[in-house]
Amino acid sequence: MNTFLANRVKNAPRSFTRAILDVIGHADIISLAGGLPDESLFPHELIKKEINHSLDTLPRSMYQYSQAQGAYDLRCEIAKTYTNSNPKQILMTTGSQQGLDLLCKSFINTGDTLIVEAPSYLAALNLFALYDANIEEVTLTCNGVDTVQLEELFKTKKPKFFYAIPTFQNPTGWSWSEECKREVARLAEKYKVIVVEDSPYNAIRYEQNAGVGFEELLPELSVTLGTFSKTLLPDFRLGWMRANEDFLKVFQSMKENTDLQSSKFFQYVVANMMSDGNLDSHVKTLIENYRIKRDAMVKSLKDNLGETIEFEIPKGGMFFWIKFKDEIDTMKLFDFAIKQNVAYVPGSVFYKDSSHPSPFARLNFTNASCADIEEGIKRIKIALQEYIK
Ligand SMILES: Cc1ncc(COP(=O)(O)O)c(C=O)c1O
């Protein structure tokens, strides 16, 4: 069997996400691990209404093959609502994960360097490894990346792009300060490095005002990735890329070679939900509910793990990034947690080299109920007591 396989398959990093999904599939486990939305908040009735409206009003040509860029109506809505650009600069993708793939197809030759935050989004790290990219890391803190380190990397490693999640990051929930964004834009301009801003969590904000994006700071040299997976639901697989028109044509051609086009039906449905204001109302409902869950997690963490951990309260997004004191290795602690029927993601998997022990853990607060959040954190406390015995 192995003789048939491409090198990239043999070298594929083990997906911890897959391992976690296997574990949390078992009944009785409280999962604070996945980055999943709350299923009870998927707006089923609204979707039914919008789908029926689309079926009644769209022409039959909607079912036909078409150009890969995506439904014009939706590109218009995205351009004006999220990206401060025009519809020609938007390409619809099959989730923003496809946007990441098209970026690699367009920019990365074997051995090319790209830069990521440390820590960064696990599925992006895995994908970049499949393209045999040389991945360099820049340290992330709760206010942004270390720009001195970044400049050194820009200067010495000549990266193709810097992949970043500046707002409510996965896994940390942290956001860059405006000062940091401006400095990164200045450096990118100086060293001619593309900044890829992945922005799946930007609209899920509990306190913070919308900050400036790279489409404004660096319109020609940045690419924005967006998605409806977090604001609506993941299963429509609707994402987008925003870039200058030259880059966009390349991404479009790569998409044509990958899957010809994404399905347009749900693009029209979502375009309608945006123009009639229903998506916006739905996002407000999500935010109200997720804020309650976030606050429940803050309380449970303080009550149960108090002095043993440190964390920032996320102002948006879906995650807490907690740091255990006393040299705890959260990968080892994970086995104790599973014995207590609770799951989280150990911090080490979010780095290029996941073999280093990490005192960090990512906890998701959007998927579980408030009662399960409280019970889950109590179980982590028991796991910790067992671990340090
Ligand atoms: C940072 C980041 N980028 C991209 C994605 C992929 O999202 P999509 O469902 O749009 O492919 C996720 C999903 O969790 C994510 O956290």
Image (cartoon, grey):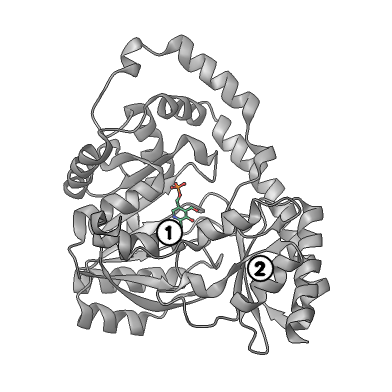
Please tell me whether mark 1 sits on a helix, a strand or a loop: helix
Q: CA distance from mark 2 to mark 1?
A: 24 Å
Query: Taking 115 as reference, is 8 above or below it?
Result: above
Q: Which residue is mark 2?
A: 313
Q: Hey, which quadrant is residue 12 in on the image?
A: bottom left
Q: Residue at x 50, y 37 (%)?
A: 235
Residue 120 in the figure: left or right of residue 4: right
Q: Hey, which quadrant is residue 373 in on the image?
A: bottom right
Residue 317 in the figure: left or right of residue 247: right
Q: Which mark is residue 123?
A: 1
Q: Is residue 219 visible?
A: no
Residue 61 picture location, percent across and down: 31, 14
In the image, what residue type sits under mark 1? Ala
Task: Verify CB contact (< 8 Å) between mark 2 and mark 1.
Answer: no
> In the orientation shown, which residue stands out farthest toward the bottom?
326
Question: Which tag is nearer the camera, tag 2 or tag 1?
Answer: 1
In front: 41, or 289?
41
In front: 35, or 232?
35
Q: Residue at x 61, y 25 (%)?
A: 46
Please tell me whether mark 2 sits on a helix, a strand or a loop: loop
